[in-house]
Amino acid sequence: MARTKTILLVDQDNAIVKFVTLILENEGYRVFTARDGEEALQKIGQARPDLVLLEIVLPRKNGYQVCRALRADKMLRTLPVVFISAKSQPSDRFWAKRVGADGFVAKPFDPADLVREIRARLRKHQLVNA
């Protein structure tokens, strides 16, 4: 039987955290959360999630800085990162890709679209690392 996939959700908005956690747990994922960029990097180092859902606007370190730090780390550079943000202008998407994000989901989002994006990124990551 396959191991349950773990997702780190990084967002400071309590309503988003509750909503996304409910969606993902109903899909069978294990979810843990961080409220800022520093906490996210600590939790990633400790728990080694299978994927990170990352808001751009965060205290202490923003999402771009977190993603850049992950891509600079030899052990974490292939960890799938999907930005989930209301900052979804073309320039925001450009910078997300530039710092190494694998995907982008704009808020507000359709839960089915979020789940599809996560599944696609996990599947691609599994194929690349098989």
Image (tube, grey):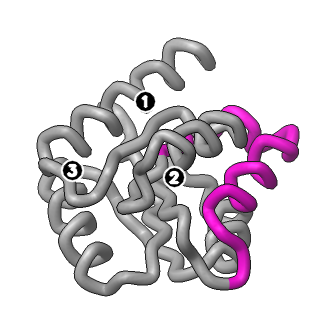
Residue with the mark numbered 3: 28
Q: Looking at the image, is mark 3 or mark 1 nearer the viewer? A: 1
Bounds of the magenta span?
60-82
Quick one: 130 or 3, which is closer to the camera?
130
* Disc 3 from disc 1: Cα separation: 16 Å
Classify mark 3: helix, strand or loop: loop
Residue with the mark numbered 2: 52
Seen in the image, is 4 located left or right of residue 70? left
Position of 124 relative to 25 (above/below): above
Q: Residues within 10 Å of mark 3 (few under 14, many from 20)?
A: few
Q: Position of residue 12 (x, y in %)?
A: 45, 82
Q: Which amino acid does label 2 sit on?
A: Val
Asked whether 90 falls inside the magenta stretch, the response is no
Quadrant position of residue 26: bottom left
Tell me which numbered mark, 2 or 3, is placed earlier along the sequence. Answer: 3
Q: Residue at x 28, y 58 (%)?
A: 107
Q: Where is residue 4 in the image (x, y as percent from the top left)?
A: 35, 46
Q: Position of residue 121 (x, y in %)?
A: 43, 30
Residue with the mark numbered 1: 121
* Disc 1 from disc 2: Cα separation: 10 Å
